[in-house]
Amino acid sequence: MKKIFILMVFGFMGQLSAQRDSTLVYKKRVLEATEVDFLSSYFTQDGNNASVTGGIGTEELTDLTATIVVSIPMNEDDVLTVDAGFSAYTSASSSNGNPFDISGASRNEDDDDDRQKAVGDVIGSPWVSSSGASRADVWTSVNVDYAHSSDDRNTIWNADLSFANEFDYTSIGFGGGLTKLYNEKNTTLGASVKVYLDTWSPVYPTELKAYDEVNGDQNDGFFEGVTILDQSGNASLNWRPLNGFETIKRKGRNSYSISLSFGQIVSKNAQFSIFIDVVKQQGWLSNPMQRVYFSDVNNYYIGNASSIPNYTSSSNKDVFQLADDIERLPSDRLKIPIGFRFNYFINEVISLRSYYRYYFDDWGIKSNTASLEVPIKISDKFTLYPSYRYYNQTQVDYFAPYEENRSTSEFYTSDYDLSEFNANQYGFGVSYTDIFSNAHVWKLGLKNIDLRYNNYQRNTGLRANYVGLGCTFNMD
């Protein structure tokens, strides 16, 4: 399953202006006309610490995302926003939920890719992408938000409902918020709550699922005719997942969050904001597809015995280690990020946008995020956006690399997203703005085009590139 997650939020706030004559008062609409945003992005990454294969192996992934956001003024005070999109990805790591390839033979076909029976020589490798069903998938989402502004535009409340789905995961969310403006709109207070009710339809590593289906009989089902090898390359029937292995058909995870924010315009050139979130998660917080290998348990393989000594090298193309267990993590997690933004308008050409966030949770992670963006207005219509972002974190209490967890532990993971690391991200963007919407596509007047590129580098070896394109239109 992709661990990649891409979220875009589009909001609207209006200011009150009044025009009086002897008998009438006119109120400016929060949103004058329907606005349509088309957003798309392309993301690629690669690395050598795939969590699906126990902390080693290819992390190659590509993702294409497209989103449309439509904001509709229902009347002078209310705006309905509908946000719908999809993310289509291919993942070499996720494909190795079922890593086994058949060479010189065939399979007995079955509708369920994980239940295919092997006939002949079975090979696989954490460094080679499989053609399994989990190699590619599409994540889809829909979010509906309704916002209402008071007559004086000093109070805004909103309510939202969301739905998201991919092949092994479904999420339903709902929430709402309240924003108050004071001091002639120079001071802003905000609060919001969100609830997400999620359900796993677990997809397990092939060998563990097959083991459960045949009650550990390594001469039946997927294992019939397949030779399991020990560390020395000799045939063996001694492989056993930790305490046996039983699949769980469905499992839930619930998330609850409260967000508080404070914003202040300090002067005509400066403004800042502070926020804090409290997030509580309960339920199945592990990923069932992610393998774990223990240092105190013997190793067993399927594939070419001569490649076992070279298993952790990317030159290994034809042997795969059978899992000792899946990732196991606590069923509760409390997460608290605290952030600060400061924006400063230097002159009509250059301004600064800075951001800092400190995060901690009760699993042991502490992290720091700092970023700086410098918009440079080179003309009335074009603005450049060079940016830089730095991130570091400590590891969770339950993390250990490949073959370093112990079977006596209650919780364990080899997911490098939960390890200690630091990362640098370098970005550049260009924006075109036409406030008069002179260019048209059908009945849509082009208001803005934004193109961005980011390069991400983690000290664990993960590398990623992101290209994003966004277009905003006004509907005539």
Image (cartoon, rainbow, N blue to C red):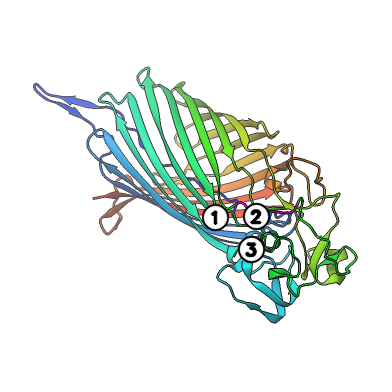
Residue 288 sits inside the magenta stretch: no
Q: Residue at x 42, y 23 (%)?
A: 188
User: Is residue 294 depicted above or below 151 in this figure?
Assistant: below
What amino acid type should be assigned to the residue bearing mark 2? Met
Decide whether the magenta segment is chiefly helix, strand or loop. loop
Report the residue that reaches farthest toward the top. Answer: 183
Q: Quadrant of residue 23?
A: top left
What amino acid type should be assigned to the residue bearing mark 1? Asp
Report the residue that reaches farthest toward the left. Answer: 23
Residue 289, numbered label = 2
Q: CA distance from mark 3 to mark 1?
A: 14 Å
SS class, disc 3: helix
What amino acid type should be assigned to the residue bearing mark 3? Ser
Between 344 and 75, which is closer to the camera in this rendering? 75
Residue bounds of the magenta highlight: 244-248
SS class, disc 1: loop
Q: CA distance from mark 2 to mark 1?
A: 10 Å
Residue 168, numbered label = 1
Between 305 and 372, which is closer to the camera in this rendering? 305
